[in-house]
């Protein structure tokens, strides 16, 4: 059993004793009962209801399924009550189908009142008993689920999957059975996917895609079925098979296999142009996210990235996109034995400093991860506009060994724009 200290999004810990543990083929979230002040005893688990609300919301974000919800108190254990008599829900419940988790929490607490009560009881029973939620959460074990429930799912936790999904927004994705899916919107934690049955779109947790992508990288193959990758396995398979180096092996279930590039360097794959006319909705106002992930920032980012890729080609070089096993850089190219890896950023007066700081950390991380024997990695930042404090940022990036350029200064990347690109 792994104890969980639930922490609200504002950093406040909750007074609620709970834990995550294996439960047969599933996982279980166990929430201890709440009690008031008594002689010689302080109140216990006073944030019971808020903790259950928060847990249900975070499980929804993870794409979790409640397979069963039962009272698991000392009374029910002592009486050896069958699960059917202490159940709080009828059948499995997919949380992405739940519109109001607070209403669900009320259903779970109200249903507890009569569980374990004597037949002649005149008053309703306790509605904050010890409960057990038996769960299916694709891609999670007890330790990783404990961390996700404790702290919440960071917006950038699935950044590779988010980057991939954004690059596919608006593109027709063919499933392994020939159906067509289309990404309508990529949010902070969910992607809205249209099908022939649901043209208005249905949400799919990004964590499901991230878990499948991680497994493809580590294992080299992913079976595409509900049991293996979650309830939207068809969509996940359609996404994975867009990746260069993948193939589909027929079977029951079919398997997507990844075979790394056999190029001399093994770095990157053929550049994937980005759709520039996408319209991705902004996140909720309370969510801190990447300015390049929606709206004008996303469109500017894609326009800059495509322009730079065209300029690379105009210099008889090959622009590269990342392979599934590589960090999610925006663009890279080889000259002799030097790999230039670029982080592209949009910029406005208000967010310029934040964007530069983010880009510097990202591109240094990429360049470290891409190091290979005999290859020199040159990190670079391509910004939408000249920095307001240009001298300062030239010094900062120069000291870090990072090239800094913006439209009109591509010569800093040895890509002088004397071509007709973009004209």
Image: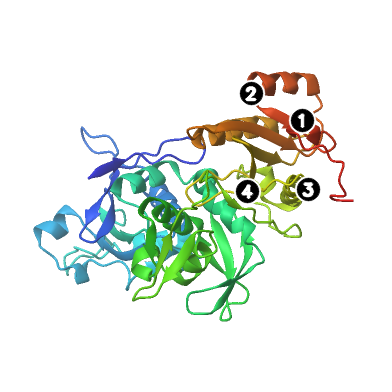
| CA distance separating discs 4 and 2 | 21 Å
| CA distance separating discs 3 and 1 | 16 Å
| CA distance separating discs 2 and 1 | 13 Å
**Dot 4 lies on which element?**
strand
Q: Is 101 situated above or below 36?
A: below
Viewer-closest of 301 and 44: 301
* Comes first in the chain, label 2 or label 1: 2
* Residue beneath disc 1: 412
* Residue beneath disc 4: 320
Disc marking residue 249 = none
**Dot 2 lies on which element?**
loop
| CA distance separating discs 1 and 4 | 19 Å
| CA distance separating discs 2 and 3 | 26 Å
Residue 51, image x, y percentages: 39, 47
**Dot 3 lies on which element?**
helix
Horizontally, residue 386 falls left or right of residue 85, namely right
Label 1 neighbour load within 10 Å: few <14, some 14-19, many 20+: few
* Residue beneath disc 3: 314
* Comes first in the chain, label 1 or label 4: 4
* Residue beneath disc 2: 401
Q: Nearer the viewer, mark 3 or mark 1?
A: 3
Viewer-closest of 9 and 304: 304
Q: Are marks 2 and 3 in contact (CB under 8 Å)?
A: no
Q: Nearer the viewer, mark 2 or mark 3?
A: 3
* Comes first in the chain, label 3 or label 1: 3
Q: Nearer the viewer, mark 3 or mark 4?
A: 3
């Amino acid at each position: 059993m792994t104890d969980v200290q639930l922490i609200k999004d504002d950093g406040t810990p909750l007074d609620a004793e709970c834990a995550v543990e294996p439960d047969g083929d599933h996982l279980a979230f166990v929430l201890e009962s709440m009690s008031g002040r008594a002689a010689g005893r302080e109140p216990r688990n006073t944030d019971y209801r808020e903790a259950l609300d928060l847990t249900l919301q975070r499980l929804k974000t993870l794409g979790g399924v409640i397979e069963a919800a039962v009272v698991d108190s000392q009374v029910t254990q002592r009486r050896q009550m069958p699960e059917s008599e202490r159940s709080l829900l009828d059948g499995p419940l997919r949380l992405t189908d739940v519109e109001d988790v607070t209403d669900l929490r009320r259903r779970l607490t109200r249903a507890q009142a009569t569980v374990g009560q004597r037949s002649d009881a005149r008053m309703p029973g306790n509605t904050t008993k010890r409960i057990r939620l038996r769960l299916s959460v694709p891609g999670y074990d007890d330790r990783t689920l404990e961390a996700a429930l404790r702290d919440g799912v960071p917006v950038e936790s699935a950044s590779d999957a988010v980057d991939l999904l954004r690059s596919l927004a608006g593109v027709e994705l063919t499933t392994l059975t020939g159906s067509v899916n289309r990404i309508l919107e990529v949010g902070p934690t969910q992607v809205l996917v249209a099908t022939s049955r649901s043209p208005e779109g249905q949400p799919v947790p990004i964590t499901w895609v991230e878990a499948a992508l991680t497994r493809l990288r580590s294992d080299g193959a992913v079976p595409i079925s509900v049991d293996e990758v979650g309830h939207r396995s068809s969509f996940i398979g359609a996404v994975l098979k867009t990746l260069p180096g993948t193939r589909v092996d027929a079977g029951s279930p079919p398997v997507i296999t990844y075979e790394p590039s056999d190029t001399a360097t093994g770095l990157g794959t053929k550049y994937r142009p980005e759709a520039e006319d996408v319209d991705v909705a902004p996140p909720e106002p309370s969510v801190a996210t990447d300015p390049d992930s929606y709206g004008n920032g996303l469109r500017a980012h894609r326009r800059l990235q495509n322009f730079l890729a065209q300029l690379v080609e105009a210099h008889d070089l090959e622009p590269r996109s990342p392979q599934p096993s590589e960090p999610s850089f925006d663009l890279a190219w080889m000259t002799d034995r030097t790999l230039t890896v670029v982080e592209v950023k949009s910029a406005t007066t208000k967010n310029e400093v934040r964007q530069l700081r983010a880009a510097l950390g990202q591109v240094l991380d990429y360049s470290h991860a891409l190091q290979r024997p005999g290859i020199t990695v040159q990190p670079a930042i391509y910004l939408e506009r000249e920095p307001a404090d240009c001298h300062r940022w030239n010094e900062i990036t120069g000291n870090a060994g990072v090239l800094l350029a913006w439209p009109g200064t591509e010569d800093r990347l040895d890509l002088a724009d004397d071509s007709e690109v973009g004209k």
